[in-house]
Image (tube, rainbow, N blue to C red):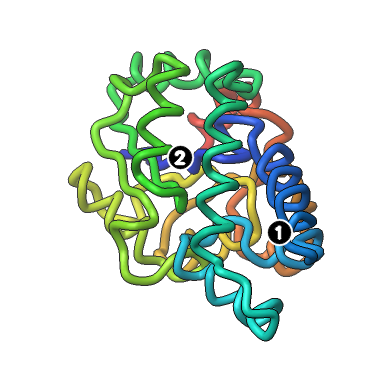
Amino acid sequence: MVEGVILDMDGLMFDTERLWDEVWEDTGRTYGIDAGKEFNKRTRGTNEAGAREVFLELFGAGGIDYEELQERCFARLEEELERHIPVKPGLYELLDALKGRDIPMAVASSTHRKMVLRNLELAGITSYFAAIITGDMVKSGKPAPDIFLAAAKAIGREPERCLVLEDSSNGIRAAAAAGCLSVMVPDLDPPTPELARLYTVRADSLKQVIDLLDAL
């Protein structure tokens, strides 16, 4: 029986992964680099430290200031989200369903805490969550299990009694490593045979997750 639910943010609650990819690609061009598919795919779901490591591997020889580039990306993304926060279909219904069942919820997002808190506030859903764990609060980002273990602890539940909702490959790997049940709701990462062996079940939308709760 599920005793706690842990939700990712980008690509799961909000349709922001596409926007994030676009911002990185456009900003990267101003630095003369192609921060496109390979960088975005490898860093999807990871925290800032993990993304920086991949960036230096791919572009470090060019002498680009990663922190400066990242700050420009964050600034542009914040401007876009202030205009419109793209909430995924079924999010509000799912949160209400979990609240009605008295199931504690946590956010476990690799994104920096400031942006996570702002996005939750813009969507008006902060009060649903008993804990908010972000990428800058753990040593190792996804696919390491740290963030989900921290989230389970924060809501007072054993990891194996927690259900993780994720859209990314790294997120599903992290959930499996933490010993959690998981539902993959694919966004930009299509499920692979490897991921099918790791997640508990796949859902096509957050609305479908509501119907799966009693079966898990």
Determine the residue positioned at 34% across, 18% down: 99
Q: Compare marks 1 and 2 and give the one earlier in the sequence.
A: 2
Q: Amino acid at mark 2?
A: Leu
Disc 1 is placed on an element classified as helix
Crowding near pointer 2: few (<14 within 10 Å), some, many (20+)? Answer: many
Q: Is residue 91 left or right of residue 34?
A: left
Q: Position of residue 39 (x, y in %)?
A: 72, 65
Above or below — where is 129 with respect to 163? above
Above or below — where is 53 with respect to 201? below
Report which residue position mark 1 lands on.
40
Q: Quadrant of the N terminus?
A: top left
Viewer-nearest of discs 1 and 2: 1
How far apart are labels 1 and 2 at the CA level? 21 Å
Report which residue position mark 2 lands on.
7
Q: Residue furthest bottom?
A: 61
Determine the residue positioned at 55% across, 69% down: 65
Determine the residue positioned at 46% across, 53% down: 110
Q: Position of residue 173 (x, y in %)?
A: 56, 65
Q: Position of residue 42 (x, y in %)?
A: 68, 67
Above or below — where is 161 with respect to 37? above
Determine the residue positioned at 53% across, 61% down: 46
